[in-house]
Amino acid sequence: MAGTLHLVGTPIGNLGDVSRRAKETLARVDLVAAEDTRRARKLLSHLGIRAELTTLFEGNERARTQTLLDVLRDGRDVAVISDAGMPGLSDPGYRLVRACAEEGIEVRVVPGPSAAIAALVVSGLPSDRFVFEGFLPKKDGERRARLEALATERRTIVLFESPRRVRATLEAVASTLGPDRPVSVARELTKVHEEVLRGTAEELARTAEGEELRGEVVLVIGGATEGPAPELSELVEEAAELIRAGWKKREAAAEVARRHDVSTNAIYRALLEER
Protein backbone atom coordinates (compact mmCIF):
# COMPACT_ATOMS: atom_id res chain seq x y z
CA MET A 1 0.00 0.00 0.00
CA ALA A 2 1.38 3.39 -1.00
CA GLY A 3 2.29 6.02 1.55
CA THR A 4 0.75 9.46 1.88
CA LEU A 5 2.16 12.79 0.70
CA HIS A 6 1.67 15.63 3.17
CA LEU A 7 1.99 19.29 2.12
CA VAL A 8 2.89 21.13 5.30
CA GLY A 9 2.69 24.88 5.79
CA THR A 10 5.54 26.37 7.84
CA PRO A 11 6.04 29.80 9.46
CA ILE A 12 6.85 32.77 7.22
CA GLY A 13 8.92 34.37 9.97
CA ASN A 14 7.50 33.86 13.44
CA LEU A 15 8.13 30.32 14.67
CA GLY A 16 5.18 30.70 17.00
CA ASP A 17 2.89 30.38 13.99
CA VAL A 18 3.65 26.70 13.42
CA SER A 19 0.56 24.61 14.06
CA ARG A 20 0.35 21.60 16.36
CA ARG A 21 -0.82 19.48 13.42
CA ALA A 22 2.20 20.56 11.36
CA LYS A 23 4.50 19.54 14.23
CA GLU A 24 2.75 16.18 14.63
CA THR A 25 2.91 15.48 10.90
CA LEU A 26 6.61 16.34 10.57
CA ALA A 27 7.39 14.13 13.56
CA ARG A 28 5.43 11.19 12.14
CA VAL A 29 6.45 11.00 8.47
CA ASP A 30 9.30 8.86 7.20
CA LEU A 31 10.91 11.55 5.05
CA VAL A 32 10.80 15.35 4.87
CA ALA A 33 11.50 16.94 1.48
CA ALA A 34 12.64 20.53 2.00
CA GLU A 35 13.54 23.40 -0.28
CA ASP A 36 16.61 24.11 1.88
CA THR A 37 17.66 21.40 4.33
CA ARG A 38 19.68 23.86 6.43
CA ARG A 39 16.58 25.97 7.13
CA ALA A 40 14.53 22.83 7.61
CA ARG A 41 16.94 21.53 10.26
CA LYS A 42 16.63 24.79 12.18
CA LEU A 43 12.83 24.51 12.17
CA LEU A 44 12.85 20.83 13.11
CA SER A 45 15.39 21.46 15.86
CA HIS A 46 13.16 24.20 17.26
CA LEU A 47 10.28 21.72 17.28
CA GLY A 48 12.39 18.98 18.86
CA ILE A 49 12.07 16.72 15.82
CA ARG A 50 14.72 14.47 14.32
CA ALA A 51 13.77 13.52 10.77
CA GLU A 52 15.30 12.16 7.62
CA LEU A 53 15.70 15.02 5.15
CA THR A 54 16.10 15.34 1.41
CA THR A 55 16.01 18.32 -0.92
CA LEU A 56 13.23 19.42 -3.26
CA PHE A 57 13.98 22.70 -4.98
CA GLU A 58 13.49 24.26 -8.40
CA GLY A 59 16.73 22.89 -9.81
CA ASN A 60 16.06 19.23 -8.94
CA GLU A 61 12.26 19.12 -8.83
CA ARG A 62 11.76 17.02 -11.96
CA ALA A 63 14.29 14.35 -11.02
CA ARG A 64 13.47 14.37 -7.30
CA THR A 65 9.76 13.93 -8.04
CA GLN A 66 10.50 10.46 -9.40
CA THR A 67 12.63 9.60 -6.36
CA LEU A 68 9.90 10.69 -3.96
CA LEU A 69 7.30 8.75 -5.94
CA ASP A 70 9.39 5.61 -5.42
CA VAL A 71 9.48 6.31 -1.68
CA LEU A 72 5.70 6.73 -1.60
CA ARG A 73 5.14 3.59 -3.68
CA ASP A 74 7.15 1.66 -1.06
CA GLY A 75 4.58 2.66 1.55
CA ARG A 76 6.55 5.43 3.26
CA ASP A 77 4.97 8.78 4.15
CA VAL A 78 6.56 11.98 2.86
CA ALA A 79 6.13 15.60 3.97
CA VAL A 80 6.99 18.52 1.69
CA ILE A 81 7.90 21.90 3.17
CA SER A 82 9.19 25.11 1.62
CA ASP A 83 11.52 27.70 3.14
CA ALA A 84 8.46 29.55 4.40
CA GLY A 85 4.71 29.32 3.89
CA MET A 86 2.85 26.80 1.78
CA PRO A 87 4.77 24.46 -0.56
CA GLY A 88 3.68 24.63 -4.19
CA LEU A 89 2.87 28.35 -4.07
CA SER A 90 5.75 29.90 -6.04
CA ASP A 91 7.76 27.02 -4.58
CA PRO A 92 8.36 23.41 -5.65
CA GLY A 93 5.64 20.85 -5.06
CA TYR A 94 2.95 20.95 -7.71
CA ARG A 95 4.69 18.46 -10.02
CA LEU A 96 4.86 15.92 -7.20
CA VAL A 97 1.21 16.52 -6.29
CA ARG A 98 0.16 16.08 -9.91
CA ALA A 99 2.18 12.87 -10.24
CA CYS A 100 0.65 11.48 -7.03
CA ALA A 101 -2.85 12.36 -8.21
CA GLU A 102 -2.24 10.57 -11.50
CA GLU A 103 -1.13 7.42 -9.64
CA GLY A 104 -3.88 7.54 -7.05
CA ILE A 105 -1.47 8.23 -4.18
CA GLU A 106 -3.17 10.07 -1.34
CA VAL A 107 -2.22 13.73 -0.87
CA ARG A 108 -3.10 15.63 2.30
CA VAL A 109 -2.59 19.28 3.15
CA VAL A 110 -1.65 20.73 6.52
CA PRO A 111 -2.53 24.42 6.02
CA GLY A 112 -0.27 27.07 7.44
CA PRO A 113 0.89 30.67 7.04
CA SER A 114 1.00 32.26 3.59
CA ALA A 115 2.80 35.52 2.89
CA ALA A 116 0.54 36.19 -0.09
CA ILE A 117 -2.69 35.87 1.92
CA ALA A 118 -1.27 37.70 4.93
CA ALA A 119 -0.19 40.64 2.77
CA LEU A 120 -3.55 40.72 0.99
CA VAL A 121 -5.69 40.89 4.11
CA VAL A 122 -3.50 43.56 5.75
CA SER A 123 -3.25 45.68 2.59
CA GLY A 124 -6.57 47.46 2.95
CA LEU A 125 -7.36 46.63 -0.68
CA PRO A 126 -10.35 44.53 -1.83
CA SER A 127 -9.79 40.89 -0.92
CA ASP A 128 -13.00 39.26 -2.19
CA ARG A 129 -11.42 38.58 -5.60
CA PHE A 130 -7.70 38.53 -6.33
CA VAL A 131 -5.10 37.05 -8.65
CA PHE A 132 -1.67 35.78 -7.58
CA GLU A 133 1.16 36.47 -10.04
CA GLY A 134 4.12 34.98 -8.17
CA PHE A 135 7.38 36.72 -9.11
CA LEU A 136 7.48 39.13 -12.05
CA PRO A 137 10.26 38.64 -14.64
CA LYS A 138 13.64 40.08 -13.66
CA LYS A 139 14.25 41.86 -16.98
CA ASP A 140 12.70 45.31 -17.21
CA GLY A 141 11.07 44.81 -20.61
CA GLU A 142 9.55 41.46 -19.70
CA ARG A 143 8.38 42.86 -16.35
CA ARG A 144 6.61 45.77 -18.05
CA ALA A 145 5.03 43.43 -20.60
CA ARG A 146 3.57 41.30 -17.78
CA LEU A 147 2.20 44.40 -16.06
CA GLU A 148 0.71 45.71 -19.32
CA ALA A 149 -1.13 42.40 -19.65
CA LEU A 150 -2.67 43.11 -16.23
CA ALA A 151 -3.68 46.70 -17.05
CA THR A 152 -7.41 45.90 -17.25
CA GLU A 153 -7.42 43.26 -14.52
CA ARG A 154 -10.17 44.23 -12.08
CA ARG A 155 -9.16 41.84 -9.34
CA THR A 156 -6.59 42.80 -6.72
CA ILE A 157 -3.12 41.66 -7.81
CA VAL A 158 -0.72 39.96 -5.37
CA LEU A 159 2.90 39.30 -6.27
CA PHE A 160 6.25 38.55 -4.69
CA GLU A 161 9.30 40.70 -5.32
CA SER A 162 12.96 40.79 -4.41
CA PRO A 163 13.78 43.70 -2.08
CA ARG A 164 16.43 44.76 -4.61
CA ARG A 165 13.82 45.25 -7.34
CA VAL A 166 10.95 46.81 -5.36
CA ARG A 167 11.65 50.37 -6.52
CA ALA A 168 11.99 49.34 -10.18
CA THR A 169 8.77 47.35 -9.98
CA LEU A 170 6.87 50.21 -8.33
CA GLU A 171 8.10 52.57 -11.07
CA ALA A 172 6.96 50.06 -13.69
CA VAL A 173 3.55 49.79 -11.99
CA ALA A 174 3.22 53.59 -12.00
CA SER A 175 4.10 53.87 -15.69
CA THR A 176 2.06 50.92 -16.96
CA LEU A 177 -0.94 50.77 -14.61
CA GLY A 178 -1.03 54.45 -13.68
CA PRO A 179 0.69 56.61 -11.05
CA ASP A 180 -2.46 56.70 -8.89
CA ARG A 181 -2.95 52.93 -8.76
CA PRO A 182 -3.27 51.96 -5.07
CA VAL A 183 -0.49 49.70 -3.81
CA SER A 184 0.56 48.08 -0.56
CA VAL A 185 4.13 46.97 0.13
CA ALA A 186 4.43 44.41 2.92
CA ARG A 187 7.80 43.19 4.16
CA GLU A 188 9.08 41.00 6.96
CA LEU A 189 5.53 39.88 7.79
CA THR A 190 5.19 38.28 11.27
CA LYS A 191 8.79 39.24 12.10
CA VAL A 192 10.10 41.88 14.51
CA HIS A 193 10.53 44.50 11.78
CA GLU A 194 7.20 43.87 10.04
CA GLU A 195 6.18 46.85 7.93
CA VAL A 196 3.24 47.63 5.66
CA LEU A 197 3.34 50.72 3.42
CA ARG A 198 0.20 51.93 1.66
CA GLY A 199 -0.19 54.59 -1.00
CA THR A 200 -0.18 55.11 -4.74
CA ALA A 201 2.38 53.46 -7.00
CA GLU A 202 4.04 56.83 -7.59
CA GLU A 203 4.17 57.70 -3.87
CA LEU A 204 5.64 54.37 -2.86
CA ALA A 205 8.18 54.47 -5.71
CA ARG A 206 9.42 57.77 -4.28
CA THR A 207 9.45 56.31 -0.76
CA ALA A 208 11.57 53.38 -1.97
CA GLU A 209 14.08 55.71 -3.64
CA GLY A 210 17.37 55.51 -1.81
CA GLU A 211 15.94 53.14 0.81
CA GLU A 212 17.50 49.71 1.19
CA LEU A 213 14.73 47.22 1.81
CA ARG A 214 15.46 43.86 3.32
CA GLY A 215 13.55 40.65 3.81
CA GLU A 216 10.64 39.08 2.00
CA VAL A 217 8.46 41.60 0.11
CA VAL A 218 4.89 41.20 -1.11
CA LEU A 219 3.25 43.80 -3.36
CA VAL A 220 -0.52 44.10 -3.41
CA ILE A 221 -1.92 46.21 -6.27
CA GLY A 222 -5.47 47.45 -6.56
CA GLY A 223 -7.41 46.21 -9.58
CA ALA A 224 -8.40 48.39 -12.51
CA THR A 225 -11.53 50.46 -11.86
CA GLU A 226 -12.22 50.75 -15.55
CA GLY A 227 -11.69 48.32 -18.36
CA PRO A 228 -13.51 46.35 -21.03
CA ALA A 229 -16.31 44.25 -19.60
CA PRO A 230 -16.38 40.59 -20.63
CA GLU A 231 -18.57 39.56 -23.55
CA LEU A 232 -22.14 38.57 -22.65
CA SER A 233 -21.41 34.98 -23.66
CA GLU A 234 -18.56 34.87 -21.14
CA LEU A 235 -20.80 36.29 -18.42
CA VAL A 236 -23.50 33.73 -19.20
CA GLU A 237 -20.99 30.88 -19.00
CA GLU A 238 -19.74 32.17 -15.66
CA ALA A 239 -23.33 32.25 -14.40
CA ALA A 240 -23.93 28.76 -15.80
CA GLU A 241 -21.03 27.45 -13.70
CA LEU A 242 -22.75 28.82 -10.59
CA ILE A 243 -26.03 27.22 -11.64
CA ARG A 244 -24.31 23.86 -12.05
CA ALA A 245 -23.01 24.35 -8.52
CA GLY A 246 -26.58 24.72 -7.22
CA TRP A 247 -27.35 28.43 -7.59
CA LYS A 248 -30.71 29.63 -8.92
CA LYS A 249 -30.62 31.47 -12.24
CA ARG A 250 -31.61 34.86 -10.85
CA GLU A 251 -29.08 34.57 -8.02
CA ALA A 252 -26.32 33.47 -10.40
CA ALA A 253 -27.05 36.34 -12.77
CA ALA A 254 -26.98 38.85 -9.91
CA GLU A 255 -23.69 37.49 -8.56
CA VAL A 256 -21.93 37.63 -11.94
CA ALA A 257 -23.33 41.12 -12.55
CA ARG A 258 -21.96 42.24 -9.18
CA ARG A 259 -18.53 40.83 -9.98
CA HIS A 260 -18.28 42.70 -13.27
CA ASP A 261 -20.48 45.75 -12.57
CA VAL A 262 -22.87 44.98 -15.43
CA SER A 263 -26.64 44.51 -15.83
CA THR A 264 -28.24 41.57 -14.05
CA ASN A 265 -31.22 41.55 -16.41
CA ALA A 266 -29.10 41.07 -19.53
CA ILE A 267 -27.44 37.98 -18.07
CA TYR A 268 -30.69 36.61 -16.68
CA ARG A 269 -32.52 37.00 -20.02
CA ALA A 270 -29.67 35.25 -21.81
CA LEU A 271 -29.87 32.37 -19.31
CA LEU A 272 -33.62 32.02 -19.91
CA GLU A 273 -33.10 32.00 -23.67
CA GLU A 274 -30.70 29.07 -23.32
CA ARG A 275 -33.53 26.74 -22.28
Image (cartoon, helix red, strand yellow):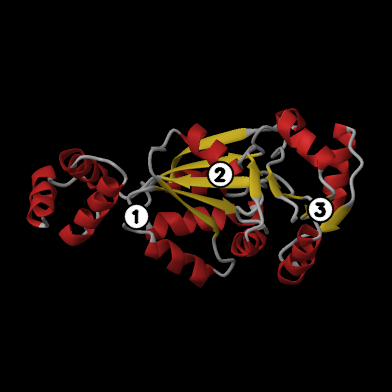
Residue 43 vertical position relative to residue 266 in the rendered view, above or below: above
Residue contact at pointers 3 and 2, CB within 8 angstroms? no
Give the residue pinned by disc 1.
153
Residue 145 vertical position relative to residue 271 in the rendered view, above or below: below
Residue contact at pointers 2 and 1, CB within 8 angstroms? no
Quarter holding the C terminus is: bottom left
> Mark 1 falls on what kind of element?
loop
| Residue 25, percent from left and from top | 77, 39
Q: Is residue 128 left or right of residue 198?
A: left
> Mark 3 falls on what kind of element?
loop
* Residue at x-position 34% and y-position 55%: 153
Of the numbered discs 2 and 1, the one sitting upstream in the chain is 2
Q: Amino acid at mark 2?
A: Ala
Of the numbered discs 3 and 2, the one sitting upstream in the chain is 3
Q: Amino acid at mark 1?
A: Glu
In the picture as drawn, the residue positioned furthest to the front comes out as 1
Residue 177 vertical position relative to residue 14 in the rendered view, above or below: below
* Residue at x-position 69% and y-position 40%: 12
Give the residue pinned by disc 2.
116
Is residue 192 visible to us here? no
Q: Is residue 244 left or right of residue 199?
A: left
Q: How many marks?
A: 3
| Residue 60, percent from left and from top | 76, 68
* Residue at x-position 28% and y-position 46%: 242
Q: Amino acid at mark 3?
A: Arg
Dividing the picture into quadrants, the one containing residue 13 is top right
